[in-house]
Image (spheres, rainbow, N blue to C red):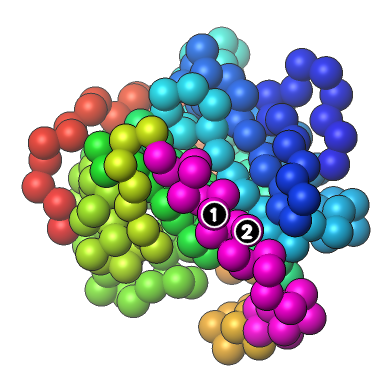
Amino acid sequence: MRPESGSPVRVEQHDTWTELVLQRPHRRNALDIGTAETMLELVSGAPAATERRVLLLRGEGPSFCAGLDLKAMHAGDPHEWISSFFRHWLPLHAALARLDIPVVCAVQGAAINAGAALAFAADFLIVEEEAHVQLGEVRQGLAAPIGIGWLTLRHSAALARRVALRGAPIPGPELVRLGLAHDWAPSGRALERARALAAELSALPAQGVRRTITGLHAAVRGEDALDHFTRIADAAAIRQPAGTATSRIEPVPPQRKARTP
């Protein structure tokens, strides 16, 4: 777990847990191809490269993750960019799903679209009270294959439909009420609470945690994680010809006051 200098993702090793930190605050930690590639490399090597017992995901700066880096996408052919991005993005989420250690995520500011999918990948999501998570692709005429994949793995079909079909921003306390987040924290305190939870989880017997996660994997999945996310991406027509909706992605406008599900 040693990214090169200048990497879009920083690794911080604590006594009993590892933190992966998105560090592109000048772009609100928007995801480009290099970020997805680096995260895949780090997460794929997590169990073998560290004895830490918990993985904590977080973002540097005022916002967790603004979604895809649209500036990078439109610098060239958007269709080719999306195809290249998903070559890393799909296996990254499969790797997260296969981990045998708990994943915690701290969200401040906003987690939008692909950022929301990354937040929903956590076993324990801690969100600041004034922050929000928004799986908003439906409002752009698109689907959210990875977000849908995590929602259907972890939650009921009814809740997955409410979140994915409305595409509305959901604030921290409401995420907890819906069962989408583990807890909310006052402004500026999400990371503190996430680290306390990471310490609590890492104090449990490692063998018991791994056996429990292995059992949970067997109970909730009838197919390989990569097959699960790929099937949903294919059904959502993420691999579209140039000139279709994939090449016309626009940012989701902030709607912090919108009604929640």
> In terms of depth relative to the viewer, which is nearer, 223 or 77?
223
Seen in the picture, residue 188 relative to 202 is either above or below; the reply is: above
> In terms of depth relative to the viewer, which is nearer, 99 or 173?
173
Question: Can the viewer see residue 198 in this picture?
Answer: yes
**Residue 25 horizontal side relative to residue 32, left or right:** left
Residue at the (46%, 34%) spot, across then down = 64
Seen in the picture, residue 167 relative to 228 is either above or below; the reply is: above
Seen in the picture, residue 245 relative to 261 is either above or below; the reply is: above
Q: Quadrant of the C terminus?
A: bottom left
Q: Tell me the SS state at disc 1.
A: helix
Q: Tell me the SS state at disc 2.
A: helix
Residue type at mark 2 is Ala
* Mark 2 in CB contact with mark 1 (< 8 angstroms): yes
Residue at the (59%, 65%) spot, across then down = 200
**Residue 49 part of the magenta segment:** no
**Which numbered dot is residue 196?**
1
**Which numbered dot is residue 199?**
2
Region rendered in magenta: 189-214
**Residue 207 part of the magenta segment:** yes
Q: Quadrant of the N terminus?
A: top right
**Residue 254 horizontal side relative to residue 107, left or right:** left
By secondary structure, the bulk of the magenta-drawn segment is best described as helix
